[in-house]
Amino acid sequence: MRLPPSLKHDPRALAVQILNRVDAEEAFAEPLLDSVLSSGQPPAAVDRGLLTFLVYGTLRTRGLLDFLIDRFYRGKPATLDPVVRNILRVALYQVRFAEKIPAYAAVDEAVGRAKRLAPGRDKLVNAILRNALRGLAGVELPDPKADPAGHLAVAYSHPRWLVERWIGCFGLDATRALCRADNEIPPLTLRVNTLKTSRTGMLERLAQVGLEVKATALSPDGIVLAKPPASPRELPEIAEGMLFVQDEASQLIARLLAPRSGERVLDLCAGSGGKTTHLAALMENDGEIVAADNQRAKLAALESTARQWGASVVRTAPVDATDPDGTARLGTFDRVLVDAPCSGLGTLRRNPEIRWHLTERKLAEMPPLQGRILANAAACVRPGGILLYSTCSVMPEENDGVVAAFLEAHPDFSPQSPPAEVPAGTVDAEGFFRTFPHRHGTDGFFGALLVRQR
């Protein structure tokens, strides 16, 4: 990220630059933050915390911030320069949500930053922010009774189209609770590598070095780190292959598939291997796991992780899951996991930028893609074998709809109830695995087990 030397170690300027890239490139904030934090800038731990606070806080409240900015900008909202808008967003976020930062200081700093990041626009930034300071108390949000969707969209910073869809799917009260939960800071959840240690042993080890830890409520393999260090991925236990950063609901997917020692298992959309290594641990490193993905960089990362974890049963295969010929060459398996590409709408606590990148058109493209992948995966399941379809989405069209269409086209498959050890509160009346941030305190995940009869 190129910044003027005077702003090189300014977390607020860095926050603006990260937000600019999130917008311009539809990038995720986490790798951009990791890149900055691992580079040694800003140097102070308090600044590292402030940078993370500003980036994620601004993304989570962006809808409300834009609503306020547009009230005090006299031009057409669409004409406001994106860099200027991000300078304003960061400043207003500090004014509205950062109690330790005086409002006048946030404004003065934003104006000075604008002189360097958006030359010639500093007076505009000053005018909008000064007007906002005088008028914030008088701004009224959309009326919750006359326009409930509009009110939730602004108050909880979600796109209106998404709020309307959720109200139709889940009802008003559940949508309000879901939107509120999406804006909470999620816990740092880690999965223990049971090939090397036990959860009890790891809890004791982390507590001995002064970390505040507890066992996860739903996953028998998880640990919650209450007060993580500024860069938690630098924990030595992660580098040693003893811990993996993974949401609690995501940890339950491998247990939902319930692989057994000696089986042949396919992870068709393996990514960088979070669930693959968990499958290896559950199989006690006995059997064979084929981890397939169409991105070789992810497979290289997966191979590295498998070596760290001591998961010797894993081998990788560069395969496009949408290609029936490519998947057919993999052979047949006892169990197949399809952790399908999806909208990610169950992960808005961790990835708030998704809500601003996703459109109705992009969402509509997901189910056909997911259906093709699921059909290809089905051909890899032996008679009597198990197929697990999962997503990190809460949208019915990506979950129930895809499964229903698949079962109609594949009469040789039928639904199967989850294993008894899967927490009862995560299984619905139809036998589908389903979690929500506002109900379970986890990311939103879906899972459907399907057995091949012949």
Image: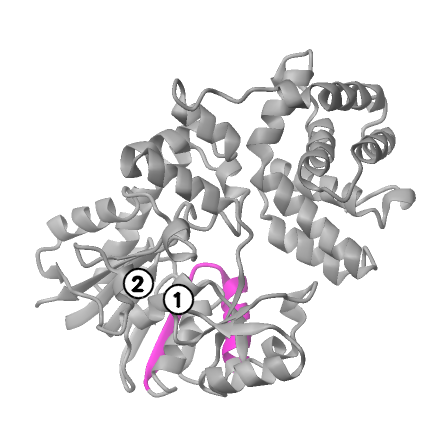
Q: Amino acid at mark 2?
A: Thr
Look at the image and say whether residue 299 sits in the magenta stretch.
yes
Which residue bears the numbered disc 1?
A: 292
Task: Please state which of residues 375 and 165 is positioned toward the viewer in this rendering.
Answer: 165
- Residue 441 falls left or right of residue 211: left
Camera-nearest label, 1 or 2:
1
Q: Which residue: 38% across, 61% down?
A: 269
Residue under the point 70% across and 63% down: 230
In the figure, 234 relative to 162: above or below? below
Contact check, label 1 and label 2, Cβ < 8 Å: yes
| Residue furthest out toward the front | 137
Residue 343's x, y, as percent? 41, 45
- Asked if residue 393 is positioned above or below residue 442 in the image, the reply reads above
Whether residue 361 appears in magenta in the rendering, the answer is no
From the image, tell me which residue sits under label 2.
Answer: 327
Give the color scheme: rainbow, by chain, secondary structure or one colour.
Answer: one colour
Please name the residue shown 52% across and 44% down the image. 183
Secondary-structure class at tag 1: strand
Q: Earlier in the sequence, mark 1 or mark 2?
A: 1
Rendered image quadrant of residue 54: top right
Q: Dot 1: within a 10 Å radius of its alpha carbon, few (fewer than 14), some, or many (20 or more) residues?
A: many
Quadrant containing the C terminus is bottom left
In the image, the segment drawn in magenta is 287-308
Q: State the SS at label 2.
A: helix
Q: Nearer the viewer, residue 137 or 263?
A: 137
Residue 110 placement, left or right of 238: right
Label 2 neighbour load within 10 Å: few <14, some 14-19, many 20+: many
Horizontal and vertical percent position of residue 160: 44, 28
Q: Nearer the viewer, residue 164 or 23?
A: 164
Amino acid type, label 1: Ala
